[in-house]
Image (cartoon, grey):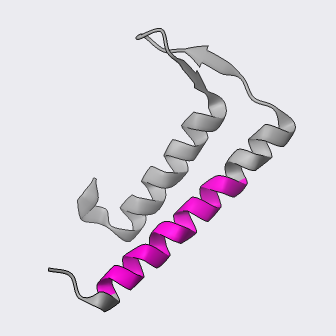
């Protein structure tokens, strides 16, 4: 079971990642973005891809074993 300090550190990390993603997505909303159709015929934007990359990279940097 996680200790309170560990939970607080993880919560802080998550909050920081969310804030970074929010800023990235807001930037895309202001400048515009392209949309593609995936193989399953659902849409995905370049903003979606950029946010996912940012989140994945940040998590792997902080928690390398979570890849």
Main SS category, magenta section: helix
Q: In terms of depth relative to the viewer, which is nearer, 50 or 22?
A: 22
The image shows residue 9 at horizontal and vertical percentages of: 40, 82
Q: Residue at x 31, y 84 (%)?
A: 6
Q: Is residue 11 magenta?
A: yes
Q: Nearer the viewer, residue 44 or 66?
A: 44
> Vertically, is 52 above or below 33?
below
Identified at 69% across, 51% down, the residue is 24
Residue furthest left in the image: 1
Query: Residue, x 26% and y 58% (percent of image)?
Result: 66
Q: Position of residue 15 (x, y in %)?
A: 53, 69
Going by the picture, which residue comes out furthest to the right? 31
Query: Measured from the top left, where is residue 49 in percent x and y?
Result: 55, 35
Position of 54 relative to 3 (above/below):
above
Q: Which residue is drawn at the image coordinates 33% and 80% (left, top)?
A: 7
Is 20 on the left-hand or right-hand side of 57?
right
Compared to residue 64, the image places residue 42 above or below, namely above
Q: From the viewer's perspective, is 13 left or right of 28?
A: left
In the shown orientation, is residue 34 left or right of residue 9?
right
Give the magenta-colored segment's residue range.
6-23
Q: How many marks?
A: 0
Q: Is residue 57 magenta?
A: no
Quadrant assignment for the N terminus: bottom left
């Amino acid at each position: 079971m996680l200790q309170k300090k560990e939970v607080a550190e993880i919560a802080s990390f998550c909050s920081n990642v969310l804030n970074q993603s929010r800023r990235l997505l807001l930037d895309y909303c202001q400048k515009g973005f392209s949309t593609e159709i995936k193989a399953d015929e659902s849409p995905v934007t370049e903003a979606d891809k950029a946010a996912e990359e940012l989140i994945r990279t940040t998590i792997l940097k902080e928690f390398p074993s979570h890849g």
